[in-house]
Amino acid sequence: MEQKKPSVITKIKRSYHNSNPRKPMQRIKFALKRSPLFFSVIVISFIIIAALIFPITKLYSSTKIAFEERAMTFDLYRESQDKLKVKNAEMYLEKIQNSFTDEQLKKIIEKHTTYKLFINNKIAEKKTATFYSTTDKTLITFYEQYPSDVKDMIPEALIKKYSKIDETEILKLIKISANAAKYTITEQEYPDGRKLYIQFDSVKTGEIITLDLESNFAKTLGLEEYSIEIFYNKAT
């Protein structure tokens, strides 16, 4: 009986089986023997990639360290400048307080400060003695305004110390009379000064709110009248 010749595929399989050992390391050795050029190309490629990546990694690391050191230096500089400003401000405040009496400082600040009175957001004129309101809400505003050169010349601590516009001080300078209307007092700081608000809510029709001002304070506000009456007449 004639023996069949093996097919081409069978020959290829046998050749691969005979030429490729089963163990991985033996296969690698066999591949290196068969294709030394391919192996050389792979090795050279790894060397080139490593040579490119290493400088970039090193540059990134150096840049990161330099940035962190610079940021730390800036923070230290800013902190030292803040401390220096505080120290200089304290020394300047002490120098002013040692150079002037309380009364002198008070007069200096008052001289360079503008005081205004508003009733329902309308400024009280020089001869204002009566004011008519058409709403059951009445807002009295005292405005203490000082120019920027005063803030540069006089420490903020002294401006606040001698301010007339705070709840404790204002009640020494004014007297409020109202039959039934209740009011609240609030303060607000602004870049060029501060305001004190006296807010009346639910004022009854026909009710009169009387604002009596201390004479010197009235003059400071630019008023000739020391007493102002606010009448609430409901709008028709």
Image: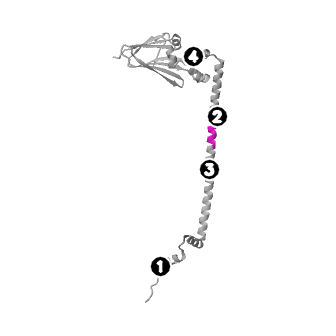
Name of the residue lying farthest toward the bottom: 1
Query: In the drawing, does residue 181 fall left or right of residue 107?
Result: left
Q: Amino acid at mark 1?
A: Thr
- Name the residue carrying label 4: 110
Q: Amino acid at mark 2?
A: Ser
- The secondary structure type at the circle numbered 1 is helix
How busy is the neighbourhood of tag 1: few (under 14 within 10 Å), some, or many (20 plus)? few
Q: CA distance from mark 4 to mark 3?
A: 60 Å
Location of mark 2 (residue): 80
Which residue is labeled 3 in the image?
61
Bin the neighbour count of mark 4 within 10 Å (Cα to Cα): few under 14, some 14-19, many 20 and up: some
Q: Position of residue 32 (x, y in %)?
A: 59, 71
Q: CA distance from mark 1 to mark 3?
A: 58 Å
Instruction: Report the quarter where the N terminus lies.
Output: bottom left
Q: Count neighbours of disc 2 (C-alpha within 10 A) and say few if under 14, some if 14 to 19, many if 20 or more.
A: few
| Spatial CA span between label 1 and label 4 | 112 Å
- Residue at the spot x=65%, y=27% of the render? 88
Q: Nearer the viewer, residue 146 or 169?
A: 169
Q: Residue 224: x, y in percent?
A: 50, 10
Mark identifier at residue 10: 1
